[in-house]
Amino acid sequence: MLKQKRNKQLAEINVVPYIDVMLVLLVIFMITAPLLSQGVDVNLPAARAKMLTQNKEPIVVSIDRNGNYYLNIAASPVAVINANSLENRVTAELKRDPKRQVLVKGDKEVDYGKVVSAMVLLQHAGASNVGLVTTSDESKVRK
């Protein structure tokens, strides 16, 4: 008895187009991920504190080591902003949402007076509570 081979058609999915799409998505994410970090790169001091929860993006005033102010909600978050413009912009934002968090992110090498000046400007703008941003690196904190 001879066995006959049956001609079966095998249905296989061509995965090459899916791999192409995945590689394109990977490249897109690799390019856009560094752009998600807003503001100015500041060397933050370390502190042990609980992380705050937030519903809406807070208003963040950054102060670089040269004492320049930056505002994350400005038209250009990486452009230096003067004290009057900073106060006016924050006042306008707080009139829309008075409960919005306001934070100061000061470089650890900036003059303390500049940080205090920023906090005073924010208080004049209507911010009743101003928080300070620190890094949570436990190794930098002295025990």
Image: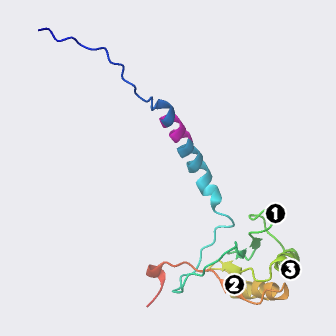
Q: Residue at x 83, y 86 (%)?
A: 126
Mark 1 or mark 3, earlier in chain: 1
Figure colour scheme: rainbow
| Direction top: furthest residue | 2
**Image disc number at residue 95:** 3
**Image disc number at residue 49:** none
76 w.r.t. 65: above or below: above
Dot 1: few (<14), some (14–19), or many (≥20) neighbours within 10 Å? few
First to last magenta residue range: 19-24
Q: Residue at x 64, y 59 (%)?
A: 36
Q: Amino acid at mark 2?
A: Asp
Mark 1 or mark 2, earlier in chain: 1
**Image disc number at residue 111:** 2
39 w.r.t. 83: above or below: above
Q: Which residue is mark 1?
A: 75
Q: Amino acid at mark 1?
A: Ala
| Magenta region includes residue 23 | yes
Tell me the element at label 2: loop
Dot 3: few (<14), some (14–19), or many (≥20) neighbours within 10 Å? few
Q: Position of residue 73 (x, y in %)?
A: 77, 69
* Residue 72 shown left or right of residue 10 in the figure: right
Q: Amino acid at mark 3?
A: Lys
Decide which of 70, 23 is in the foreground and name it.
Answer: 23
Tell me the element at label 3: helix
Q: Position of residue 121 (x, y in %)?
A: 81, 85
Decide which of 92, 85 is in the foreground and name it.
Answer: 92
